[in-house]
Image (cartoon, helix red, strand yellow):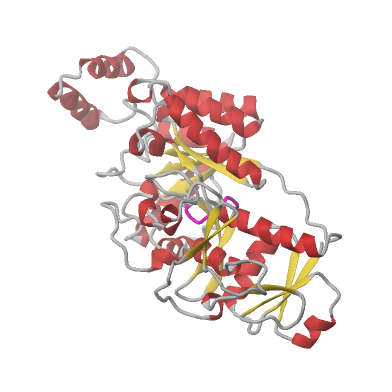
Amino acid sequence: MEEVLVFVPKKTTRIKYVFSLVFKDILKVNCDVTSDLDEFLSSDRAKFVYSDKPHSDDLFFRSSDLLFHRGIENIDTDYVEHEGNNALFPVYDSNSVLPFDVFSAIFYVVSRYEEYQPYVPDRHGRFTAKLSVSHELNFLNKPIVNIWANIVRDIILNKYPDFVFPKRTFKFVPTYDIDSAFAYAQKGLVRSIGGYFMSLKSLNWSEVIQRSRVLFSGFKDPFDTYDLQIEYQRKYNLKPIYFFLFGLYGQFDKNINTRNRTYRFLVKKMGDYAQIGIHPSYYSNENPELLHKEIRNLEEVVNKDITQSRQHFLKLVLPVTYRNLIEEDITDDYSMGYASLPGFRSGICDPYNFYDLDIEAETKLRIHPFAVMDGTLRDYMELTPDEAIEEIKKLIDEVKKVDGTFSSLWHNEPLSDEKRWKGWRKVYEEMLKMATE
């Protein structure tokens, strides 16, 4: 594997993290960071200087202070336009190959630095998309970190044309959240009576009829779309990941009783076709014991270790949520995305390791960002099915440009193609077609 040599005036954990992310994770080459100027000057490898001043006539990336500091400070999010995109951390140095500190910009976005600052959360305690600098600077819908990494690659290739960066390939990772496995079935007597009462109160006769058909006449539950999902797996050669809500019933946790045999059989069945992860319940963020219990109970059903997760309601509070997951031996989390807007919350479309700013350390928790969720398109943005397809196409095209990983978040309900989700089965299948072409 090829290797790039970088001179920095001082090695820090942030420096080591961001250069490993850019070169090893994204560009797929090694990177050796040194503070020994003599070693750097005597080397004939592909190399560059990352500092506040050039130390040679080699490639020079002008640095700001962010990667040489510790702790969380107020950051001036000034920006400069570069190659059609706004870029953070502008630098004013005619010797610099870029007009902005690309490595600080990458670290700021990927580490979610702004989410450690005070902010006004939404009603679920979440940092929202419209608070983000990515939304403010109009690059939320682009994998900007991958784009910036490719700019660095091209600069190196221009200087060292014989250097070889491995060819990357586009990947698609479909994921499902099972918040409510069935619409009417397996709810139990009390919840079923309550459902009838609510339907009658609102004079929703069609729902009364449909509930009765499912419960008493053997009709298939509208949310029971699992055979269709398996059919999609075979047709498009998919390897999805399922996140099952496995907590107690509550105001925001409406799934089937975890002791229900049919529900447990469903979890086992889907485990035969796909990977299974935990969908921690709404209040598990504030109650680590609850998280522990839910993971253990799900492990009993699938008879294997649970190492993957995605937060219910995407309730992600940094760094608390990730620390709780690490404590429970979760190795991979898929919560990195916004509920209200599609795009790239951490600016990147590929998996990467979580950097805990509070303790200034890279962790082994692997973060898998997703780009789009069904509920975002239908409920938050209020798009029609055709408009949703166009929005998804734009995201897939952006990821394909950087040969990255496109990850989707879907639920079982939209595949019913009924009521509020009429026409949305087509949306999902069109996404599968575009992502697997």
The quarter of the rendered structure image containing the N terminus is bottom right
Q: Tell me if residue 405 is in the magenta stretch.
A: no
Between residue 60 and residue 75, name the one nearer to us.
Answer: 60
Counting from the top left corner in percent of width and height, residue 183 is at: 33, 27
Q: Tell me if residue 346 is in the magenta stretch.
A: yes
Apparent side of residue 340 relative to residue 336 in the rendered image (left or right): left
The quarter of the rendered structure image containing the C terminus is top right
Apparent side of residue 354 relative to residue 405 in the rendered image (left or right): left
Between residue 20 and residue 235, name the one nearer to us.
Answer: 20
The residues colored magenta run: 345-350
Between residue 54 and residue 2, name the one nearer to us.
Answer: 54
Q: How many marks do you count on the picture? A: 0
Q: Is residue 334 visible?
A: yes
Q: Residue at x 29, y 52 (%)?
A: 124
Q: Residue at x 35, y 33 (%)?
A: 382
Task: Give the answer, above or below, for where 2 lies relative to 43.
Answer: above
Counting from the top left corner in percent of width and height, residue 367 is at: 54, 56
Between residue 379 and residue 321, name the one nearer to us.
Answer: 379
Q: Is residue 224 visible?
A: no
Q: Quadrant of the rendered structure where residue 412 is?
A: top left
Q: Residue at x 51, y 35 (%)?
A: 392
Task: Give the answer, above or below, for where 12 lies relative to 409.
Answer: below
Q: Quadrant of the rendered structure where residue 436 is?
A: top right
Magenta stretch secondary structure, dominant: loop
Apparent side of residue 429 relative to residue 380 in the rendered image (left or right): right
Q: Quadrant of the rendered structure where residue 92 is?
A: bottom right
